Amino acid sequence: MNARVLALLLRTSPGDRAIVALPIIAFGVVTALVLTVIGGAQAFWTWTDPDAGLYQALAAIAVVLLIVPLFTLGGAAARLSARRRDEKLSTLRLLGVSPAGVVAATVIESTLLAFAGAVAGLLGYFVLAPLVALIPFRGEALGIESVLLPAIHILAVVIGVVLLSAVSAAIGLRRVVISPLGVRMRTDVPKVHWIRAVFAVVVIAVAIALIQVFPQVAGLAVTILVVAALFGAVLAVLNLVGPWVLKLQARRRLNRAQRPEQLLSARHVLESPKAAWRQVSGVAMTSFVAVFAGTGVSLMDTMSGAEADANLMLAVDIRTGLIITLAASFLMVAVSVGVNQASSILDQRDLHRSLHFLGMPLRTVDIARRQSMMSPLLMTAIGSAVCAAAMMLPLIGISIIVAPLSLLTIAAVIAAGIGLVWLGARVTTPLLARAFAAA
């Protein structure tokens, strides 16, 4: 590989600059939120009084609930930064550039984008840290010394984000190395298999069983670690089974389609169920968190009502923690929607050009694009909420799940997530209009 190869990859056209900014923004948000979440959680682990165990358990669960989706977003940003060079990469391979040269050049470029985003996220963390330090727990603010991470931990997070980008870029280049023409012709169609559903059912069933057993047979520290790991495992398995569920739904919609936009939206999902899932996975994760939040609010009200004086401070702290967790989840969803929607439009410029030449109206294509995202959303949100409810029932009891305040909180969070996704789709409509105008 020589300097000309890297220069060709780094050369950016005016229309390509928007998609360069997307992974940088995503990596910046990932870095800032990961540092902020870990920094806020570390304050609880310095406490040693009898109530410290409960705070630590809630902090551990909140960290897992946020870290897994954040790194999912980071992986999507890394794939975007590598995928946007598919055409140039296939051209380089056809011109005789070695596979090692193509991989090295693209991994370097993706790493540079991730590093730029991580630096921006680091600056964002230093802006957020003083605000997080003002949040009151146990009647007093956390304090800046409690939320600022040691330099070695900050460096580890930045390196982790950059490595995530490099590994995702290298994995995403397998099509280019194996078959240069396969990238240009888009012959490598992503596939999803029913075995994903079997694996998901097994993991969720094991998680429910372990949550019932461990609090009775293990100590507090072990129970905290197990519960946090199980929440992370279920979140991960939802990402695994989600594309398969959307594939089944899209096939059903395709068979029943009666309008052009219905046909286009179903075909769009079937073209890449994994890409369709990435657009709604943020709301799926938020729905999962919403069930936990709703049951937590109900538990808080129950404790406050039973022993107001003794549990008032704990109840207020639980509410504060839930609000912070949901706010971070919504921010993640907003960025994820923006990245996936904008990158989808920019990736499908050739398709939009072809539809324009065939006489397809812009409004029809826009409706189809939004339907391909909004249609699977309800199923995804409900499915995630049901999984979380199944895990929470053994711990808190069905009386808390069916409490009016709990149901209201869950419904409000899911509705807000759906509205946020809808808004993200509407915001990117001008980008689609420019793609049509360029045709």
Image (cartoon, rainbow, N blue to C red):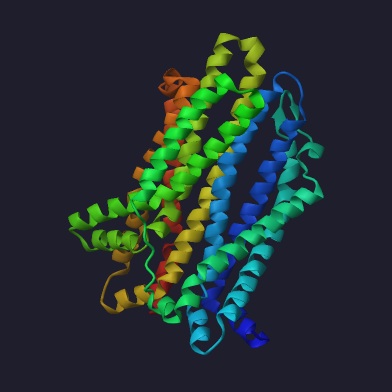
Residue 345 appears anywhere in the view: yes
284, 297: nearer the viewer: 284
Q: Is residue 11 left or right of residue 293?
A: right
x, y percent for residue 24? 61, 63
What residue is shown at x 58% (from left), y 52% (from top)?
71
Q: Is residue 256 left or right of residue 147?
A: left
What residue is shown at x 42% (from left), y 59% (from top)?
275
What residue is shown at x 64% (from left), y 24% (from top)?
220
Placement of the N terminus among the 4 image quadrants: bottom right
x, y percent for residue 38? 69, 42
Picture quadrant where residue 373 is located? bottom left
x, y percent for residue 370? 36, 57
18, 40: nearer the viewer: 40
354, 104: nearer the viewer: 104
Picture quadrant where residue 191 is located? bottom left
x, y percent for residue 238? 44, 45
Residue 323 appears anywhere in the view: no
330, 147: nearer the viewer: 147
Placement of the C terminus among the 4 image quadrants: bottom left
Q: Residue furthest bottom?
A: 95
Q: Is residue 415 above or below residue 317?
A: below
What residue is shown at x 72% (from left), y 41% (from top)?
39
